[in-house]
Amino acid sequence: MDPRPDTLLQHLGEEERILGAVVPPIFQTSLFVFDDPHSMWDTMQHHPGGPPFHYSRLGNPTNHIAEQKIASLEKAGACKLFASGMAAISAAIVSVCRAGSHVVMVDTAYGPSRQVMQNLLARFGVTHTLVDGRTVESVVDAIRPETSLIYLESPSSLIFRLQDLAAIAGAAKERGIATACDNTYCGALLQNPCELGVDMVVHSGTKYLNGHSDVVAGVLCTSAERMDAIVRNELALLGGALPPFPAWLLMRGLRTLRLRLAQHAGTADTLAAWLSSHPKVRQVHHVSLPDYPQRDLYLRQMRGSGGLFSFEPTFATRDEVYRFCASLKWFRIGVSWGGHESLAVPIEVHPLDWEAPRWMIRLYCGLEDPQDLIEDLERAMAQV
Ligand SMILES: *Cc1c(COP(=O)(O)O)cnc(C)c1O
């Protein structure tokens, strides 16, 4: 029987204990040398990403350890680390676009992912349509003859909407369209889009996978065949490789992924339930709440929830939302999430189906004691 994910997270890729070291070294090297020219050229041609390795822009043994672990978690044929989530996301998008291509993207996707389409690829004649994504029809209806990619993010990371990954991937496959899904919320443990038929899975490794707010990194998982082309083109030529030291930190973070995620999720459930019954809260957006609008899909598609959710307060003006956030002590005001520290983001959200934008507060629950975090929210509620 194959070892289970938690065992693989500790050992996969580390079979070769160099000089007996229980922790693999950081291969802080830009290049790898060969005994003869034939093996160098052979490696560059046939195994550009390694192993064997020849140049750290394409592959490095430290990175390779983390990549093997993440590929196994995501049940994908191959994984590559990138210099940031955005480097991985833009590589995935560019890999299937050419002048005249069209991309269907969910409107709730991470802002900079949408900007790749709006600011960058529009300049090269690639068009896109933003769709709601909560029904399969909303995605399929936007498909055109020139559509080359459907880009998903489920759950989205501000109002936590889901897309039916298996159904959308199936519809795309029938039409020869590639699919990609940002799986950052799920940290590779709560959901595996490749298993549901999605072609490319991307992550901000900056969030749960590293988990200590000390690394910016990105992850791309796909089939070995598709990855070979991405290594030769988007990784090699756009050049967004992750250096080995942050890759080593990420590998270390992965060892405690399950423990951390469970703690973040438990705290988020406690806080979301507390906020749901608070008189100054209009609505809580959290996938694991019993009244979550897409509960059936959540139970079918995901294996649990994470530490991130948002709520709409009754005091929904900018000034009051700002005052609330500034009154918090343990929740610090800041973007990103996935580390040890709790964070709050006051943000105006405007999905396609809302007539007007609404102010809300996104909370990320860190590893602090949940009771201290509730007392923090209580104190800030009294200030508005
Ligand atoms: C942070 C984030 C990204 C971008 O990742 P970086 O590592 O910051 O480049 C992409 N998608 C989601 C959902 C994120 O939260």
Image: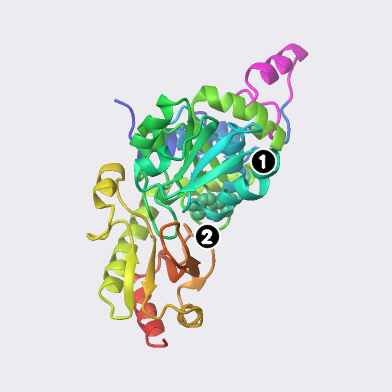
Judged by its main secondary structure, the magenta piece is loop
In the image, is residue 256 part of the stretch drawn in magenta? Answer: no
Q: Is residue 311 left or right of residue 178?
A: left
Boundaries of the magenta span: 33-59
Cβ–Cβ below 8 Å for labels 2 and 1?
no
Across and down, in percent, residue 121 comes to: 65, 42
Q: Residue at x 60, y 41 (%)?
A: 127
Across and down, in percent, residue 61 comes to: 60, 32
Farthest residue toward the right? 37
Residue underneath mark 2: 336
The quarter of the displayed image where residue 228 is located: top right
Across and down, in percent, residue 356 comes to: 45, 68
Q: Residue 240, which numbered label?
A: 1
Query: Helix or strand or loop: what does disc 1 sit on?
Result: loop
Q: Residue at x 40, y 47 (%)?
A: 133
* Res 186 seen here: yes
All told, the count of numbered labels is: 2
Which residue is nearer to you in this view: 176 or 337? 176
Q: Residue at x 42, y 41 (%)?
A: 139
Q: Is residue 277 left or right of residue 84?
A: left
Answer above or below: position of 69 versus 311. Answer: above
Q: Is residue 225 left or right of residue 277?
A: right
**Amino acid under disc 1:** Gly
Which residue is nearer to you in this view: 159 or 305? 159
Q: CA distance from mark 2 to mark 1?
A: 20 Å
Crowd rating for badge 2 (residues with CA inside 10 Å; few <14, some 14–19, many 20+): few
